[in-house]
Amino acid sequence: MRPEKIDRIATIVILGLTGVVGLLIISLLVYILATGLPNISWHFLTSSAEAFKSEGGIRDQLFNSLYLVVITMIVSVPLALCAAIYLSEYAPANRLTSLLRLAIEVLSSLPSVVVGLFGYLVFVLKFGMDFSLLAGALALTILNLPILTRSCEDALQQVPYLQRQAGLGLGMSKWRIVTKIVLPAALPGIITGIILSAGRIFGEAAALIYTAGQSSPAIDYSDWNPFSPTSFLNPMRPAETLAVHIWKVNSEGLVPDARAVSNGSAAVLVITILLFNLLARYVGHLIKRRLVK
């Protein structure tokens, strides 16, 4: 068989498999949105579970999910960025560096339920955090750190080495080259990775069942004191996120219209994650255009 024919057959097979995967994803999205959008209303989004009829409001769960993402990113972004800078700019090519990269790969493949059990044993029980937003954020940091580190490292390595050599030729120190040349050039990729990782942890559920809890006490949105037990800013309060709420509604079956609530919550979750992805592309493109100018 001629190479041209083999190449044509391989191209058709690859395109066909890609089309099947794309069709499955689109079908799943269409199904979730078609069954969930009719159950979404402004009252559904802005009312608490106690205030909404049949206990279906998701205001608190939606806020808890967004607040948990913010706390997680505050913890994980500096750690991931420092680790990426070390691996990309300072780490020598030896066995220790290879072992570190292997550890990051292994950590990124851990099941979220295992991380949740670890967080329960360490953060909830050992450190006495109980079920809280902070314990959930630390557990999500363990999940998010390896993926975010790799994305930041890839963004740094995409900066041409010639720019580093130019900085050395001007007499700049290694640290000034990293902070003044490499980081600004890699900023679009870093921000894109941060937003995409935020979208990923927004939909996490298994790790949060054992750390953040499965219930949300009454939240006072007028209380801005983060040390108050009822304050919406208190990181030590238990918090049920949107993904955990979907699992809880389906598993317990205590809500009369559990299917409608679950479908509406799932649609909100999918739409929010899609917005995270679109925002990542837009912000990365916008920063790249400004840097080019």
Image: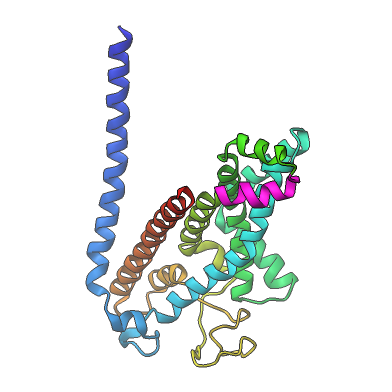
In-image side of 154 versus 23 (left or right): right
Q: Is residue 197 left or right of residue 172?
A: left
On the image, the x and y values in percent for residue 191 come to: 52, 56
**Is-magenta flag for residue 181?**
yes
Kindly give the residue lying farthest to the top in the view shown.
1
Query: Which residues make up the magenta segment?
Result: 172-185
- Quadrant housing the N terminus: top left
Q: Residue at point 41% right, 52% down?
A: 285
**Residue at x 36% of width, y 59% of height:** 274
Q: Position of residue 165 (x, y in %)?
A: 67, 36
Magenta: predominant secondary structure element? helix
Look at the image and say whether residue 66 sits in the magenta stretch.
Answer: no
Along the line of sight, the residue nearer the viewer: 238 or 152: 152
Position of residue 123 measured from the top left corner of the image (x, y, whole percent): 69, 69
Residue 108 in sight here: yes
Tag count:
0
Q: Give the image quarter of residue 243.
A: bottom left
Above or below, 291 against 11 in this view is: below
State whether residue 149 appears in this view. no
Front residue of this view, candidates 282 and 266: 282
- Indicate the colouring scheme: rainbow
Which residue reaches farthest front?
170
Left of 27 or right of it: where is 242? right
Q: Residue at x 69, y 50 (%)?
A: 83
Q: Tell me if residue 175 comes above or below residue 136 in the rendering.
A: above
| Position in image of residue 6 (x %, y %) | 31, 14
Residue drawn at x 67%, y 72% as measured from the top left: 124
